[in-house]
Amino acid sequence: MSVKTLWPDTFLDEERLGRPSRRAATAALQAHLSVLKGEPLKLSLAEALKDAEGLGGQERRFAALAVRELSRHQRLLDLASRTLGQAPSKIGLLEDQVLVRYVLWRRLFCGANWARIGPEVKLPGPIRPRTIKDDLLARMVESPLAEPPLSESGPERLATRYSFPNWLVQRLAELHPEPVLEAMLAALDEEPSLHFRARPTGTREQVLARLSEEGVAAAPVDVALDAVRITDASHRVFETRVMREGRLQVQDVGSQLIVEACRPLEGTLEGCTVADVCAGAGGKTLALADEVGRAGRVLAGDRSRRRLAQARERARELSLRHVSFPQPLPLESADVVLVDAPCSGTGSLAREPDQKWKLSAKAVEEFHTTQLELLVELAPRVKPGARVVYATCSLLPEENDAVVRDFLARVPGFEVEPLAPVFGAERAAVLCDGPFLRALPPRVPGGGFFAARLRKNPSAG
């Protein structure tokens, strides 16, 4: 039995916590309340911080962390509430449920006592309406917390301890032995580090040296060629000259690996034309633009006009004139077509923990259908000899291997190209599973990603 206690035995690093305050707590509570009412976490947080005028940088950091943590540990916090005699189902107001979660998070995950928590939440309170009095909250912080009975089911113990839905952990348990599964859930339960991609011109080592000169602690990430991890708890990196000069781009390690998966087995993408079909806000679009160079082209499209507008603005800010946004995308002119498909996001739950409670097994089935239809629809437009890189940030084979399998069964003229040669033997041992890229936490920092490369037969029509 790997899980022997459900309550955490270590606390968040105060240096990374930011500065707790009543106003910061108010922003976090208002944002979590919006999440529970169905709003996306990022939008809820942005609106709450906008309303909280005058918050300092450290207070904003605390509010942002707190709202993610309340979703991240929601199941365990509610269990603690029940164990202390305050079952969430018996707490009538949603505002009161949010308040109880907050004080228990401060106790269990921050190690704070009532003397520290009280000023943040005491009446008249950071959110209204409210029926819970201060003395009840104080008891929930200071009373002994008994260890609840552990389930006989290993997956259910892990689902409880790391606050995941049972169905998802049970599905992952079918794929991974318990020690691997626990390490994966623990990694997805942590606040992700800040990762960047070092941009041309120059090398990653030169960027790291310049960051060091400016007093920002950073380190290379070995599994990705250009990835940089900021080890400094502050956000001073955004104020550095190297950042202002456009030499760094915020980007997950897995996203950088997916861009690498677009490279040919020999040579580079220099001078090639790449179509980014599901470009979103343009993170991979910018990386691909650096890969193809000024002699190449990147064609970007997305069904979301709002997100594509963000991609346009980012390309404009970096003066990437070889990035264009034609509609429809002329896929027949592309040497590589990247399909970063809409997915469940199970590999990105560290960054978007509210999605844990919005997903369902049925939704995963629907994603499979959407992903397969997307590939089938674009296949006839891909020119012979071109490559399609299919990618997701999902941990589930229904959205990964099974989509590739079903696509090959329906559409003749394509074959899977192994990705291990692209990454080289040493990195492939960590990153690849058979012919596919399967970047799994915690072996790969920052989340879980999948990619497959499909080549269209040169003689195919």
Image (cartoon, rainbow, N blue to C red):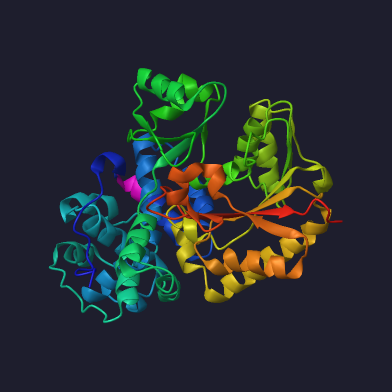
Q: Main secondary structure of the magenta part?
A: helix
Of residues 102 and 415, the one nearer the viewer is 415
Extreme residue in the left direction: 144
> Is residue 131 at all visible to an observer of this figure?
no
Extreme residue in the right direction: 461
Tell me the magenta residue range: 21-25
Relative placement, left or right, of 69 versus 15 is right
Q: Position of residue 237 (x, y in %)?
A: 42, 28
Relative placement, left or right, of 290 versus 52 is right
Q: Position of residue 227 (x, y in %)?
A: 46, 36
Quadrant location of the N terminus?
bottom left
Of residues 404 and 284, the one nearer the viewer is 404
Of residues 228 and 176, the one nearer the viewer is 176
Q: Position of residue 102 (x, y in %)?
A: 31, 59
- Residue 376 in the magenta stretch? The answer is no
Task: Please tell me in which quadrant of the rendered image residue 246 appears.
Answer: top right
Residue depicted at 43% across the width and 74% down the height: 174
Relative placement, left or right, of 233 versus 35 is left
